[in-house]
Structures are given as C-alpha cells and as structure tokens.
Amino acid sequence: MAILIALNAILIAALVFLLASLIYSQRAGAPYVPIERKAMRRILEWGNLGSQDVVFDFGSGDGRVLFEAVRRFGVRAGIGYEISWWPYAKSKLWIRFVGAGNKVRIERKSIFGIPSDVFEEANVFYVYTSPETMKKLASTEFLKMKQGSKIISPSFRIPEDDHTFRLIDSTDIGWHRVFLYEKIG
C-alpha cells in the first residue's frame, strides 16, 4: 500500500511539474510543441545542412532538432536555449544518454538573453516559435546574426517589413509551411 501511495505522489508531482513547465513556456513566448520527427527530418534535409554548419535552435525544447542535425546531417555542433523546465530536463538527459555532450549544448535560458558570441558561432538558425515571438526576435536577436546566416522557420514568417532578411525558398512539409531565409543586412 505504501508503494502505491508513493507512486501516486510521484505521478502527481510529475504532472504538476509538466503542467507548470507548459504554462511557463507559454508565458515566456512560445509553448512547448514538439515538431513531428518525420517532418523535422525532412525540414532539416530541405535546409541543406552540412558538416561545416553550426546549428542554433531558438527554444530548443527536448533538443530533437539539434540531435538530428548532429547525428543525421553531421553538423559541427548544435546550440540550443530552452526556458521551460520539462523539455530542458529531457534534453539534458538525452545529451547524457546518447553521449552528445561534445557536439550538443543546451542551456536553460530565455532566448532573449542569449550572449552575442553565440551568434558568431552559428550559421544556421532553426526557429519554431509563435508569430509574436518571431516578430520580437526579428527586431532584436536576429540582428546579431552574421551576414549570410540561414534561418529555417517552420510555420512562421519573418515579418515582411524586415529588410535584413531575404526569403530564399518556402515549401510545404507535413502540415507546416517552411520558410528559408538568408541574413543580408
């Protein structure tokens, strides 16, 4: 009976932790909504990643984009920031489990508190967020990117009045319209 009570308490605590994490990420700018693995693989393939790329993921969730970029496409490194506790904890466990600590780095921090030197490292930016956050990123954080950087954005466009980015291509993958931009200014 004591084991059953303990298991129920653990389950309730886990659910509260998960719910609090989801609410927190929503209030911070974008809910944690993982993209389907099959679509994510096709998006990264379409983005033409290669061994010289360093991929940055705004709101990296459980790290699946970074792990896939490193494992399947052989990119040099993957860097992510995630503010929500649950996906961050999950990503840290995966880093240890798959032994990716030498190529994947994920920090628990707001995407609006990213140090400038991270933008010097990366040349491919993956952004799956909300329209409001995309607008805010385009007017602040994106400006730190080096010229020629690529932005892969499932579902959400960079605001059209932003002339520091050029739309290179767009396509439908799964239920997502995916946009590929280049930083030009």
Image (cartoon, rainbow, N blue to C red):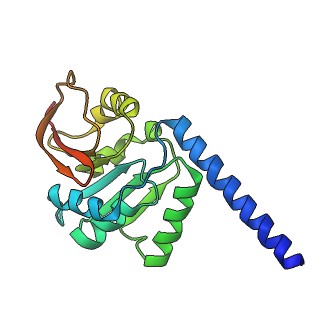
Furthest residue toward left = 168
Would you place residue 62 above or below residue 99 in this image?
A: above
**Residue 19: image location, x then y, percent:** 63, 50
Would you place residue 30 above or below residue 87 in this image?
A: above
**In this orientation, does residue 148 appear?**
yes
Furthest residue toward right = 2
**Residue 91: image location, x then y, percent:** 49, 63
Of the 4 image quadrants, the one containing the C terminus is top left
Would you place residue 182 above or below residue 36 in this image?
A: above
**In this orientation, does residue 151 appear?**
no
Of the 4 image quadrants, the one containing the N terminus is bottom right
Left or right? Give the position of 8 relative to 28: right
Left or right? Give the position of 54 relative to 13: left
Q: Nearer the viewer, residue 28 or 121?
A: 28
Residue for point 74% across, 60% down: 12
**Residue 155: image location, x then y, percent:** 28, 42
Residue for point 34% across, 28% down: 135
**Residue 112: image location, x then y, percent:** 44, 36
Q: Nearer the viewer, residue 36 or 67?
A: 36
Residue for point 74% across, 59% down: 13
Query: How many numbered discs sit on the rendered protein?
Result: 0
Q: Nearer the viewer, residue 101 or 48?
A: 48
